[in-house]
């Protein structure tokens, strides 16, 4: 035994030989296709310019006067009349700007919160709860996205007219409490984000189905819910068709109120586009403050997935 212990064990040196003195070290070559080329950056720059041009055009016309848009020698440098035009929009009694702004904030916020909650709840049921007919029911929900909104305007208006809700914010909030796209979006996300073993562990610990949803489903759905909330808020903020039909001039949302700027015989586009920029500023502020959290949440969810 001592002889075996005293025998020398051969050691295999797998280390690479040291480079010779004065030898040039080779840099690792980048694999072709791993880094985007100039064509990709050129396309992204073109998309960025195309996306920002409407804002610049609105600022260009909104900071001028009523003859700016008709001037063939129009300067491409914004003028100095934006604050004066914005003041005309805010102080116009026909527009009722502050009431419209408050109505847009309230309605868009409530719709976004409701869509996120109910869509996440329905998505959790379709993704993680097994019940009879779930697949066919999900197909039916997705199929409703193919139905044009205009088909339901007349019966919907008759319904809210019988309820006495015409002219009130409830008429635009209640029909948008949940969306088929939100249910589909959260269903697809929760199927991949939450493992079944985690749900089984929560059930073993004695958690009910709803408590499992609150403690497991909602935290896991945070990245997708943030994205859905942002898109829903923007969509509700810019919605014009149904609020224009069901609301009146005394209680409008912002897009409906701004449409009154074009109801005169002579349309001053500098005032109209100044109002458009005023309606866009809250959305820009929202993207500035929520954009970082949104991107970080999406990246966190992507890494976990």
Image: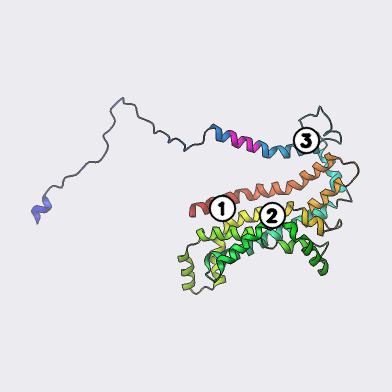
Whether residue 214 is visible here, answered yes or no, is no
Residue at coordinates 75% horizontally, 37% vertically from top-left? 57
Residue 100 is situated, as x and y percent measured from the top left of the image, at 81, 54
Residue 178 is situated, as x and y percent measured from the top left of the image, at 67, 62
Label 1 belongs to which residue?
297
Viewer-side residue, 72 vs 99: 72
Residue at coordinates 83% horizontally, 63% vertically from top-left? 166
Residue at coordinates 50% horizontally, 58% vertically from top-left? 192
N-term mark: 1 or 2: 2
Mark identifier at residue 131: none
For the residues labelled 2 and 3, the Cα–Cα distance comes to 27 Å
Whether residue 174 is visible here, answered yes or no, is yes
Callout 3: helix, strand or loop?
helix
N-term mark: 2 or 3: 3
Q: Is residue 250 left or right of residue 155?
A: right
For the residues labelled 1 and 2, the Cα–Cα distance comes to 18 Å
Q: Is residue 303 magenta?
A: no
Please name which of the two marks, 1 or 3, marks the residue nearer to the observer: 3
Label 3 belongs to which residue?
60
Q: Is residue 43 magenta?
A: yes
Q: Which part of the image, by quadrant, shows the N terminus?
A: bottom left
Q: Count neighbours of disc 1 (C-alpha within 10 A) and say few if under 14, some if 14 to 19, many if 20 or more.
A: some
């Amino acid at each position: 035994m001592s002889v075996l212990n005293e025998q020398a064990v051969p050691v295999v040196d797998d280390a690479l030989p040291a480079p010779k003195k004065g030898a040039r070290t080779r840099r690792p070559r980048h694999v072709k296709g791993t880094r985007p080329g100039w064509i990709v950056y050129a396309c992204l720059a073109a998309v960025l310019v195309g996306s920002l041009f409407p804002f610049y055009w609105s600022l260009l016309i909104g900071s001028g006067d009523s003859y700016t848009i008709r001037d063939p020698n129009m300067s491409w440098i914004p003028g100095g009349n934006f604050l004066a035009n914005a003041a005309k929009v805010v102080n116009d009694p026909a527009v009722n700007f502050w009431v419209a702004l408050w109505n847009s904030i309230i309605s868009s916020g409530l719709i976004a919160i409701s869509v996120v909650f109910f869509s996440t709840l329905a998505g959790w049921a379709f993704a993680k709860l097994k019940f009879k007919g779930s697949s066919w029911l999900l197909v039916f929900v997705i199929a409703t996205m193919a139905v044009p909104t205009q088909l339901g305007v007349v019966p919907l208006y008759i319904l809210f007219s019988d309820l006495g809700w015409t002219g009130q914010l409830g008429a635009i909030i209640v029909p948008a409490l949940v969306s088929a796209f939100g249910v589909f979006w959260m269903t697809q996300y929760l199927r991949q984000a939450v493992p079944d073993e985690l749900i089984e562990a929560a059930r073993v610990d004695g958690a009910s189905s709803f408590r499992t949803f609150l403690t497991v489903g909602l935290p896991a759905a945070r990245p997708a819910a943030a994205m859905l909330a942002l898109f829903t808020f923007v969509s509700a903020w810019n919605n014009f068709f149904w609020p224009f039909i069901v609301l009146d001039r005394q209680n409008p949302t912002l897009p409906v109120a701004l449409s009154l700027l074009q109801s005169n015989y002579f349309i001053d586009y500098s005032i109209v586009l100044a109002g458009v920029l005023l309606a866009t500023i809250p959305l820009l502020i929202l993207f500035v403050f929520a954009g970082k959290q949104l991107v970080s949440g999406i990246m966190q969810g992507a890494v976990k997935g």
